[in-house]
Amino acid sequence: MMVALIDSGLGLLSTTGWLRHLAPELDLLLFLDPDGAPWGSRTASFVTDRLFSAAHLAVQLGAEAIVVPCNTATVTAIDALRESFEPRVPVIGTVPAVKSAAAVGESIAVWATVRTTASDYQKRLIAEFANGRPVAGVACPGLAEAIDLGDMTAASEAIADAAKRTPRNCDSVVLGCTHYPLVAPEILQSLPTGTTLYDSAEAVARQALRRLDRTAELHSTTGSIDVVLSGRRGNLPAGAHAYPVGRALAAAARVPRDILISAATRASMNAPTV
């Protein structure tokens, strides 16, 4: 069985890593868009066009499910994508793990791209799942782009800037961009001691398996991992090698749990999925 994951850049690595960990027998098609990245600063029509182009190609290549591990693409076009492809091909989107944070934390910040932070979708998500908790939206310009490049200096600068704009009383920070878990240790170091980070990568991977009526089990076989870059066959960008999960996926290896989650980052098993 083949599953396609679509993002503009390395934001798909964490969800791909969880799928590889939970169901290593799946064949995975990774669609990145270096010609159009980053999507976080693009218009809605641009993001929708690129997402649909990748999805149509994925299905032509044999994908039986489409995962969109990108908050920007999800808030922009997931409904239209579902209308076009379901029920024949399940479409799984990604939303920030606000519900999980609100179940535990007292005060929450959501770090995300500029587009996601300003979206009506995120506002509705907070209204529905924050359970009355105060939630601060913190836009993180430049962070996803730095992560794509594997530029830790630029990423550190963007993290420091976002941390300065995060209310000091927040005990929970939701990583509302799928790129951000790749630098979770650096983000955590920038925040007050005791802050918990939340991301939805594991929850999205498990939702994809549920939609496919599959369970996470140990398998003796290992599926293929193929990469498509703006419509062209290729390899994971060099920036992926800056991260343990990227190196494992580049080698088409199985992905151990310990490189997907740190003791300081709470896995969002009960995160809302779409």
Image: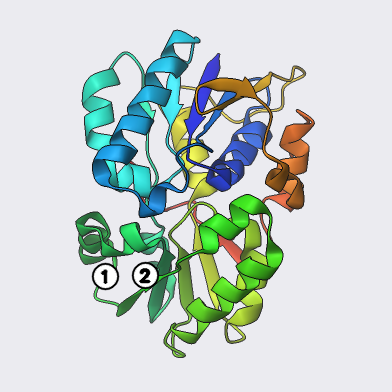
x and y percent of residue 202 in the render? Answer: 54, 46
Which quadrant would the N terminus be assigned to in this image?
top right
Does residue 65 sit above or below 194 in this rendering? Answer: above
Give the x, y percent position of residue 100: 42, 62
Type of residue at label 2?
Answer: Ala
Q: In which quarter of the image is the C terminus?
A: top left
Q: In this view, does 73 lie to the left or right of 126?
A: right
Residue underneath mark 2: 102
- Locate residue 258, reporting x and y percent: 75, 52
Residue 122 vertical position relative to residue 84 in the rendered view, above or below = below
Residue 132 makes an appearance in the image = yes
Q: Which residue is more in the foreground, 163 or 93? A: 163
In the structure shown, which secondary structural element does the residue marked by tag 1 occupy? loop
The residue most toward the front is 35
Residue that carries the numbered disc 1 in the rendered image: 131
Q: Which colour scheme is used?
A: rainbow
The three-letter code of the residue at mark 1 reads Asn
**Contact between labelled residues 2 and 1, with CB atoms less than 8 Å apart:** yes
Label 2 SS: helix
Q: Residue 247 carries which label?
A: none
For label 2, count other residues whose C-alpha is less than 10 Å away and answer few (under 14), some (14-19) or many (20+): many
Measure how far apart labels 1 and 2 are at the Cα level.
6 Å
Q: In which quarter of the image is residue 216?
A: top right
First in sequence: mark 1 vs mark 2: 2
What x and y, as percent, mark residue 116? Answer: 33, 58
**Residue at the spot 66% in from the left edge and 32% down from the top edge:** 20
